[in-house]
Amino acid sequence: MPEPIIKIKNLEITYNRGKENEFKATRGVTLDIYPEEFVAFFGPSGCGKSTLFYSILGILEPTAGELLVKGENPYLFTPEKMVQFQSMTIGIIYQAFYLINSISVMDNVALPQIFQGIAPSKRNVRAMELLKRFEIDQKADFYPDNLSGGQLQRTSVARSLVNNPDILLADEPTGNLDSISTKQVMDALEEINKMDRKTVIMITHNAAQLKYCHRVFYFKDGKLVREVPNPEKKQIAKVDKTKMLVTEMEQLSRLYPYDSPDTLKVKSLVNYITQDLNLDQLQRLESAIRIMVDRKTTPDKFREYLSASFEDGGVGYSAPRARQISDKITKLLNESKDIQRYRRRLLRADLFTNQEELVKNVTEYLLEDYHGEYSTEQKSNLRTAIFDRLVGNYRKEVFEARLNTPLKEGGAGFNKKTAHNLTLHLEKILVQGLESSGGE
């Protein structure tokens, strides 16, 4: 395991310290980023991710805590060494591009080499190499205001690499781009990470871009509240298994990248309970479930709304079906409270966090809906599988396969349909139990 290229411990950054408008932008953030990782800082505006980003860049000194880049504290550097650090160790891509309109594209890309004392002929050779790589060499003699948004950002990417830095910081790199240009830039960042073996740190509001990353750090109210590894990427960091719980929430966030976590929770429940409604009914059902998720209505009023006719403003379910759905939603939301309490204790490093109690409760919740017979050994193996899923040892697919594996092979011995239903139930509890911390 390599040493972290960036090491952050209990970092706090306070604006206007000692004044009436003092504001703590980050609160005890601790994380490590390893060489050749592609990571994202993700969360709503004002959550502290940009503050941390610019602290890594060397322009926002921490108020407390520790920040090391390649084993050194950049805020102890002399002014000369800080310039060297910011031009050679770190490259940066801005959402607003920040190209100089009065000089050519070629000169914009070559510009950072001037501060390294590189001769003009060599500067231009290096700049052209990068312009060709990102397919904008034909625009080398153009001025930036003659380029499209995608071309501007690819020029910015080229400029960030011209001094061959170890770390690339990308601040909302696709925020001003259309979907085609967005994909071009994201593919370029992925290539830089894989082929150039650069460490890439990206700020983004777009959940659809998280698939490019090895890990995602979720921020809320100045705190790092969640770390999620990408199961589709081979991990470089040694990931804490208690943080490896990847649920349907991540899948939904890719389908609905601009929806909030609370909205994704609603969609998860709607997917769970209905297959037979038209679009208008689905929209009304989502609205009703959102009110339930927000705890703004009672199960009885929720049931009445479900059973009211569509003409009267309801969803139009039959009374028995409305009761069935209301009971199921209420049950899931109540069950999810155990997950919420457990995860809050983990985030606080609460010494009294009781995993055994949580596993016991979740096992009982799942078996309440199972009407067949099961042995003591089956229940015990189910509890073990639930524990492994809760702490992130298993992905959903592995958990379901474990339930369907015969007892003699170490599984829980349930049939395929039961294994699927129990897995589905657990995943819905997990989604509803997650805090609303990832996105806007």
Image (cartoon, rainbow, N blue to C red):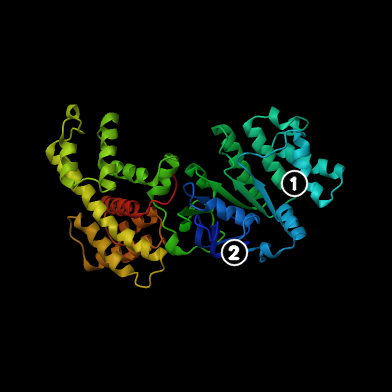
Q: Looking at the image, which residue is at 33% across and 55% down?
A: 433
Picture quadrant of residue 318: top left
* Figure check: 54 above or below 145: below
Q: Which residue type carries mark 1?
A: Val
Q: Which residue is drawn at 32% across and 59% down?
A: 339
| Above or below: residue 373 compared with residue 319 | below
Kind of element beneath mark 1: loop
On the rendered structure, is 381 left or right of 254?
Answer: left
Place of residue 21 in the rendered image (x, y in percent of width and height, measured from the top left) = 50, 54
Q: Residue 64 in the image: x percent, y percent?
A: 56, 66
Task: Answer with the quarter of the image where residue 181 lies.
Answer: top right
Confirm whether residue 278 shows in the render. no
**Residue 201: x percent and y percent?**
59, 52
Q: In this view, does 69 lie above or below 318?
A: below
- Residue 307 visible to the viewer: yes
The mark tally for this picture is 2
Query: Which residue lies under the disc numbered 2?
Result: 7
- The quadrant of the rendering that contains the N terminus is bottom right
Residue shown at 57%/37% (left/top)? 183
Q: Earlier in the sequence, mark 1 or mark 2?
A: 2
Q: In this view, does 391 lie to the left or right of 190?
A: left
Q: Name the residue under label 1.
A: 162
Which of these two is toward me, 110 or 415?
110
Give the secondary structure at mark 2. Answer: strand
Q: How crowded is mark 2: few (under 14 residues within 10 Å), some or many (20 or more)?
A: many
Q: Are marks 1 and 2 in contact (CB under 8 Å)?
A: no
Q: Which amino acid does label 2 sit on?
A: Lys
